[in-house]
Image: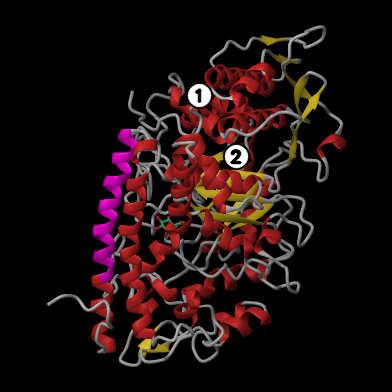
Amino acid sequence: RADDGYRLWLKYDQLGDSPQRTQYRAAAQFIAATGNAEVLKTAAAELQRGLQGLLGQPVPVVASAAGDTRRGIVLAIVPAAKVFGSPASLEGYRISTQGRNLTVMGRSGAGVLYGVYALLRQLQTSQPIAGLNLSSSPRIQYRLLNHWDNPNGTVERGYAGSSIWKWYELPQRLDPRYTDYARANASIGLNGVAINNVNASARYLTPEYLQKVKALAGVFRPYGIRVYLSVFWAAPKVIGGLKTADPLDPQVKQWWAAKSEEIYNAIPDFGGFLVKANSEGEPGPQDYGRTHADGANMLAAALGTHDGIVMWRAFVYKAGSSDRFKQAYEDFKPLDGQFAPKVLVQVKNGPIDFQSREPFHPLFGAMPKTPLVLEVQLTQEYLGFASHLVYVAPLIKECLDADTQTKGPGSTATKVVDGSLDQHRISGIAGVANIGTDRNWTGHPVGQANWYAFGRLAWDYTLTSAAIAAEWTKMTLTREPQAVATIVDVMAKSRDIYVRYTTPLGLHHIMGQSIHYGPEPWLAEAGRPDWTAVYYHKADSLGLGFDRTAAGSNALALYAPGVQKQWGDAKTCPLNYLLWFHHVGWKQPLSTGRTLWNELVTRYYTGTDSVAWMQRRWATVKPQVDAALFADVAARLQIQQREARWWRDACVLYFQTFSKQPIPAPFVPPT
Ligand code: GCU
């Protein structure tokens, strides 16, 4: 049957006949799972399902391996921390060979479950298991998907159908898809889900909806996943009947404390709150002359002694600011040190808004007393929706690898996020989900790889983008080596290609108004200057780009001196960030030997040509991948090819009205 993509990377189809399969079959004759922990049972069931599928043989689950003369796999919760190395996370695992058997140990059921998925991954990617000795612990503690799903079933910035949560059926009916969703998340190490849009409806906090949320939490719990809620700041007014939502008002505090008790009564392992406040028209503590810290700390207090956290978003900007780039920093940096211990501030990878390429957010490294959650976007709001093939792992890595230099060289964003730079106890990372009711979950089949890569990086950011792409490809599309290499190559280059045909050289925010699709660099009226395009590219007769040096908005001053020095000089600023920080003359020669204008045009044209290259590469894998899936990607690449030309022509012709320069050879269009 045609592969409809529903099973994601958890296909478990029988492996072909090979010496490896013989080896796996010999090693997996039973599964022993001792104990009653709920997640351990999940682990045993998933391993059984995976092994039976992959190996095509029955694999019984037994209570103990003692006395068994066959070879099998032993799942064990082992409280001793020392076998898991340091830092000894409760979620870490170790897979080792012990006598005849393979043992998967964790300090908790979740640890064993993650170990089981790691073991299955070995089989799915044809790795040897003889003498296996693998251990791993997550480097970041809170690893969440953020769903921007609404109660009416729509998904803000969702391109893969409707919300998978069927509120009108809950809590009575549990769609089997919820379980498959939980399996997918657990298989890549995610342990939390904020189920609703940050532009939150207060409805989720009503008793009626809490019953529904409780039902979902019950599906996720056996997979080690906790539920979080985005909250509407003015809920005490909207559903609580209070006159105010002032965080310092005693009745407001009381309302949130009671609400939190009510939630924990229903969901004892509730994860906590995610908050978007005083941003894009959402209410917040500033409406009452209070700060973000006042708001976040009040919510943290409302959680009481429960094991929950508050993730307070720093995505804030107002009309009328001199440079939107600076606002989150200006609002939050002064609050460093004022947040309660349970509060994490959630910061997008870049200072504007999930553009195809942004410099790292200046708050990374600037708030040493506050744990910062890195928020990245998996849904392709600014990356061609579900029509364009864009693998986002390189984008995520680019942010993580960025050196903030705030504590000297080597102060990477990674060390800020994992807490090691400033010795924080808690750490987090969030990915805005790209999941919907489409049969294949993500619309574009390669969108699955973005979900997959996010989880893998959240667990272990030292993995390379290419290694993750190879894993995903082997588990999902094909194990044929040449095809794997081709697909990984296309994926690895896809994000750079997208940047080239849409926003090369550090252009940003020149996309279609409000829909955020297609080019609209000429947009000059959008109700607010910071929602236009001309605000960002500042094209004029002299040149192009936003001067953020001291001569301009001086946003560069938000970075450490070393970063300022490199980026502040147009000669040393990486070309990828050039127009983020400089207004560059059209005829200015760049390090490539071309003038700005010629380089710009070259990138638009070669980027567009590269989509044709992607099409040609994809055509070569046809014999190796499922026919329906092949055709799906091929068709989307056709759309991408057409739209790359749209971007190229729109932008080149528009900017040409300022540069008044000819299109350089060899790109001169035929007359
Ligand atoms: C972007 C996006 C909005 C979203 C916002 C946010 O601006 O377009 O739909 O609400 O980010 O992250 O809060």
The residue labelled by disc 2 is 190
Is residue 476 one of those drawn in magenta? no
Element carrying mark 1? loop
The residue closer to the viewer here, 142 or 28, is: 28
The C terminus sits in image quarter: bottom left
The residue closer to the viewer here, 51 or 541, is: 51
First in sequence, mark 2 or 1: give its number.
Answer: 1
The residue labelled by disc 1 is 16
Q: Say which amino acid is labelled 1.
A: Gly
Residue shown at 82% from the left, 23% from the top: 98
The N terminus sits in image quarter: top left
Assign the magenta stretch its main secondary structure: helix
- Please say which color scheme the image uses: secondary structure
Asked if disc 2 and disc 1 are in contact, CB closer than 8 Å, the reply is no
Pinpoint residue 326: horizontal percent, then vertical percent.
Answer: 53, 75
Q: Is 309 drawn above or below residue 181 in the view shown?
A: below
Q: Which residues are magenta?
A: 627-648
In the image: residue 404, left or right of residue 283 = right
Q: Say which amino acid is labelled 2.
A: Leu
Residue shown at 37% from the left, 27% from the top: 168
